[in-house]
Amino acid sequence: QVQLVESGGGLVQAGDSLRLSCAASGRTFTADSIGWFRQAPGKEREFVAQINSSGGTTMYTDSVKGRFTASRDNAKNTVYLQMNSLKPEDTAVYYCNVIRFGRPYSSWGQGTQVTVSS
C-alpha cells in the first residue's frame, strides 16, 4: 500500500502563500487521482482539491477556487498544493490521499499543519 507524506506547512500571515507537497513511498501513485483534504480544530475533515493522474484535470472546493492550485510531478512521485492569498479560515491540518471510487482510499498520513494569522 502506498504511504503518503505531507510537508510544507507552516505559520504565515493572511495574504501569504505556501506550497504543500505530498510524496509517496511504497509504490508510485502516478496512475492515481490524488486529493487534498483539511481538518480544522473541532471540525470534520473536508475535501479541498483533487488532481487526476495526468495532472490535466483538477477540481476544488468553492472556498479555495482561484487561490489554490493542485499540480503533480509524476517523475518525482509528488503532488503539490500551491496556496495563495491565504486566509485565517484556511488554518487546518492538510492531508493528501489516493482517490478511488470517488473517495479517499489509503490510510491517512500525519498531515501538515497550516496556520494563518490575521
Image (spheres, grey):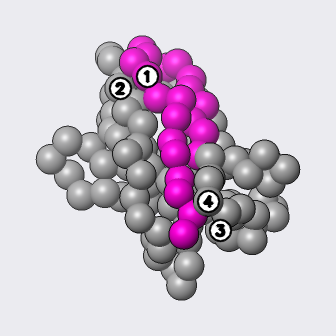
Q: Quadrant of residue 17?
A: top right
The answer to which of marks 4 and 3 sits earlier in the sequence is 4
Q: Point out the frontmost of discs 4 and 3.
A: 4
Give the Cα distance between marks 4 and 1: 26 Å
The answer to which of marks 2 and 4 sits earlier in the sequence is 4
Say which residue label 3 marks.
33
Give the Cα distance between marks 4 and 3: 17 Å
Does residue 25 sit above or below 52 in this rendering? Answer: above
- Judged from the image, the secondary structure of the residue bearing numbered disc 1 is strand
Q: Residue at x 57, y 63 (%)?
A: 2
The answer to which of marks 3 and 2 sits earlier in the sequence is 3
- 45 inside magenta stretch: no
Count of numbered badges drawn on the protein: 4
Crowding at dot 1, Cα within 10 Å, few <14 / some 14-19 / many 20+, comes out as some
Work out whether residue 111 or residue 82 is closer to the camera in this orientation and state it. 111
Say which residue label 1 marks.
10
Say which residue label 4 marks.
26
What's the residue type where badge 3 is placed? Answer: Ser
Give the Cα distance between marks 1 and 3: 25 Å
The answer to which of marks 1 and 2 sits earlier in the sequence is 1
Give the Cα distance between marks 2 and 4: 30 Å
Q: Position of residue 58 (x, y in %)?
A: 68, 60
Does residue 76 sit above or below 8 in this rendering? Answer: below
Q: Residue at x 31, y 57 (%)?
A: 45
Q: Residue at x 75, y 71 (%)?
A: 31
Give the Cα distance between marks 1 and 2: 6 Å
